[in-house]
Image (tube, rainbow, N blue to C red):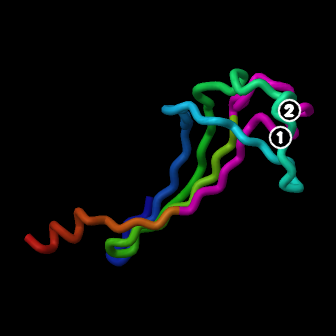
Amino acid sequence: MIDLKLASVRVFTGPAMSVILKDSQIKLTNSGGVAVDPTLYDPKTFKNNVWDWQLGGGVDVGPLVLDVRYEWGLSNVSDGDPKKVGFVNKGNILTFSLGYNFCNFIYNMI
């Protein structure tokens, strides 16, 4: 979006899909940290993939890469009743990331 000599700024938006690659045991707790009765939910109701929408931005300062993004759940994580298991079926996630761009480092060495 903006490319300065010292830094560049970008924004992004678009769909994202999460896929479960390996099944694992699901352990749920309520907001007080107390385990939810496992008889109240069926782990088979959890979906193998869910769709989200992301919106975010980032800045590159030299070789450092900083990003922030917010992700809204578009599809339910489970077909189970959220009142029984005690959690919302759609996820909302805020992600911060910090990286190092090795391509610039290698390019400057050549």
Query: Vertically, is 95 above or below 108?
Result: above
SS majority, magenta: loop
* Along the viewing direction, whichever of 39 and 13 lies nearer the viewer: 39
Q: Position of residue 43 (x, y in %)?
A: 71, 27
The secondary structure type at the circle numbered 1 is loop
Q: In the picture, residue 84 is in which quadrant?
A: top right
Q: In the picture, residue 32 is in which quadrant?
A: bottom right
Q: CA distance from mark 2 to mark 1?
A: 5 Å
Q: Which residue, given by chain and number where applicable, does mark 1 sit on?
A: 87
Left or right: 110 as drawn, with respect to 82 = left
In contact (CB < 8 Å): disc 2 and disc 1:
yes
Query: Vertically, is 81 above or below 95?
Result: above
Left or right: 39 as drawn, with respect to 10 = right
Residue stretch rendered in magenta on the structure: 74-96
Which residue is painted at 56% across and 62% down in the image? 96
Q: Earlier in the sequence, mark 2 or mark 1?
A: 2
* Along the viewing direction, whichever of 73 and 40 lies nearer the viewer: 40
The secondary structure type at the circle numbered 2 is helix
Q: Which residue, given by chain and number where applicable, does mark 2 sit on?
A: 82
Disc 1 crowd rating (10 Å Cα; few below 14, some 14-19, many 20+) is some
Q: Farthest residue to the left: give it.
A: 110
Q: Farthest residue to the bottom: give it.
A: 6
Let me know if residue 4 is in the magenta part: no
- As drawn, the label of residue 60 is none
Q: Position of residue 9 (x, y in %)?
A: 45, 64
